């Protein structure tokens, strides 16, 4: 993979287009050599991050484009997700503390685990909001393959 294989995709921030985009990115990364043992982690974190953009960044505004840039190296994957929606609260990545579970089935939360999963599955997360653009960077490290 040398300097890294790149994969770029842009789509409108709707549930349907996001779902298609996540599937395309997952297949493209696997075709470029994403280690099979990391494919699920990447797909889950990517889906959570992109769905957050669709559900929250564009919640009260007309959906615009989500741009995803992936760079796959032999030992790591960097993903940059950009959008022009509403910034993250406090202009920072949430801590990723899971929602409380409650004590009965009726008390189970419907959501509240997205950022927790993203934190658990990535090696590094960075966020910036500049010039009206949100930029979320996710990094996935994978150890050198054993020979």
Image: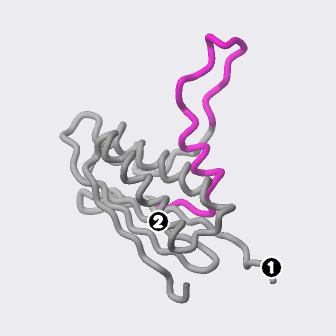
* Element type at mark 2: strand
* Image coordinates for residue 59, horizontal then vertical, percent: 29, 35
Residue 113 placement: quadrant: top right
Which residue carries the number 2 mark? 79
Query: The C terminus is located in which quarter?
Result: bottom right
Quadrant where the image shows the N terminus: bottom right
Q: Residue at x 28, y 54 (%)?
A: 11
Q: Give x and y (percent) for residue 62.
A: 18, 40
Mark 1 and mark 2: Cα distance apart in space: 25 Å
The span shown in magenta is 98-126
- Circle 2 crowding by C-alpha within 10 Å: few under 14, some 14–19, many from 20: many
- Residue farthest toward the right in the current orientation of the protein: 147
Q: Is residue 75 magenta?
A: no
Task: Please say if 52 is above or below 134.
Answer: above
**Please, what secondary structure does the residue beneath circle 1 have?**
loop
Which residue occupies the foreground of this view, 143 or 114? Answer: 143
Tally the numbered discs.
Answer: 2
Judging by the rendered image, the residue that carries numbered circle 1 is: 146
Could you tell me which residue is drawn at 57 percent across and 50 percent down?
A: 118
């Amino acid at each position: 993979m040398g300097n890294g294989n790149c994969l770029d995709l842009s789509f409108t921030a709707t549930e349907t287009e996001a779902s298609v985009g996540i599937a395309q990115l997952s297949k493209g990364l696997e075709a470029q050599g994403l280690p099979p043992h990391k494919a699920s982690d990447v797909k889950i974190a990517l889906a959570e991050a992109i769905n957050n953009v669709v559900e929250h960044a564009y919640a009260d505004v007309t959906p615009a484009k989500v741009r995803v840039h992936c760079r796959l190296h032999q030992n790591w994957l960097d993903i940059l997700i950009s959008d022009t929606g509403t910034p993250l609260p406090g202009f920072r990545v949430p801590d990723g503390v899971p929602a409380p579970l409650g004590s009965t089935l009726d008390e189970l939360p419907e959501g509240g685990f997205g950022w927790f999963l993203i934190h658990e599955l990535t090696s590094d997360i960075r966020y910036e909001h500049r010039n009206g653009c949100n930029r979320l960077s996710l990094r996935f490290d994978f150890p050198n393959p054993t020979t």
